[in-house]
Amino acid sequence: MTETFKFSQTKIDEHTIKVGVDIRPVIECKLDRVKLFDVGQKLVDKYPNLFESLVQSPTEFLIRKKFIFPGKGEIDLPTLAITPRGVVFIFPQILSMFEEEIKLNNIDDVSLDGLKIFRGSFPGKIFCRVGLVNEYVFNTGHMDSTELICSRFTKIKVPHNGEIFLSINRPDDDYNRKIQLKAVQKTEKNPDIPGVDQVQAYGVQVIVDFNNRDMSKDLDDDRILGILHKARQFNSKELYDFLNVSSGG
């Protein structure tokens, strides 16, 4: 039964795209707070449908956005974060709780524009790695996703209520192509048994991090676009070949 499940775009319940950029020397939230505020304000002014509220402290810098779905509700999500490695632009795509797809500006345009704003406020910083991270949850329905991952990708048997998490890097000469797999569940309260959740559906969380391996150069716009293009190609075909075990390994 598990062998017949086929991963496809139509089975995606949740989807978030992130563009992460490693920056050297590192950005320090405490020391660079004035510059970060300036960057954040420019992004909010230019892309109000993605960037809305600045959250700033000595240890943290975030931009958040409240997404409103008429008749369904609203959700407040981070859309930019400063990490110890650099900056991450976050583009929510599909939210299963609202059964909605979010229409946003072109990801490449926003990312390049945002990096240009960063370069203006942080001259001398090097952008040495760019990664396109796709975070998916594929709905497997009533098929136990732990059993699916175990039977398809391992020779391990996991007992009932067990857990499995796989992390694989399949690099080529130029790129890291990291894939993480984790079994997840969609649960709801059981009205008959207080305090006990019942499984509504099973799913597989798949996180794909595609980034350049050579970190010796400051990446220009053309190189960044090239990495993002290759990453999208990988996500559109080779990822599904791998997930459906049709890529020879």
Image (cartoon, rainbow, N blue to C red):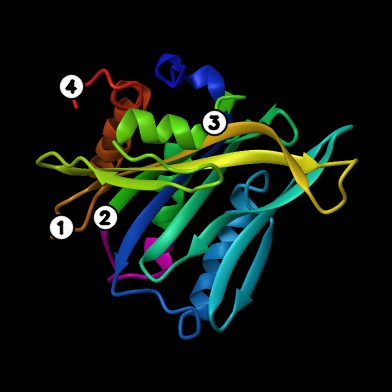
Quadrant in the picture for residue 21: bottom left
Q: Measuring from the top left, give residue 66's x and y in whole percent.
A: 74, 50
- Cα gap from disc 4 to disc 3, whole angstroms: 25 Å
Contact (Cβ within 8 Å) of mark 4 with mark 2 = no
Whether the magenta-drawn stretch holds residue 120 is answered as: yes
Can residue 106 be seen in the rendering of this structure?
no
Q: Secondary structure at mark 2?
A: strand
Of residues 127 and 192, the one nearer the viewer is 192
Of residues 202 and 171, the one nearer the viewer is 202
Which residue position holds label 2? 129
Q: Residues within 10 Å of mark 1 (few under 14, many from 20)?
A: few
Residue found at the far top of this picture: 4
Q: Quadrant of the C terminus?
A: top left
Q: What residue range appears in magenta?
A: 118-128
Q: Which mark is residue 144?
A: 3
Q: Which mark is residue 248?
A: 4
Q: Which mark is residue 217?
A: 1
The residue type indicated by label 2 comes to: Arg
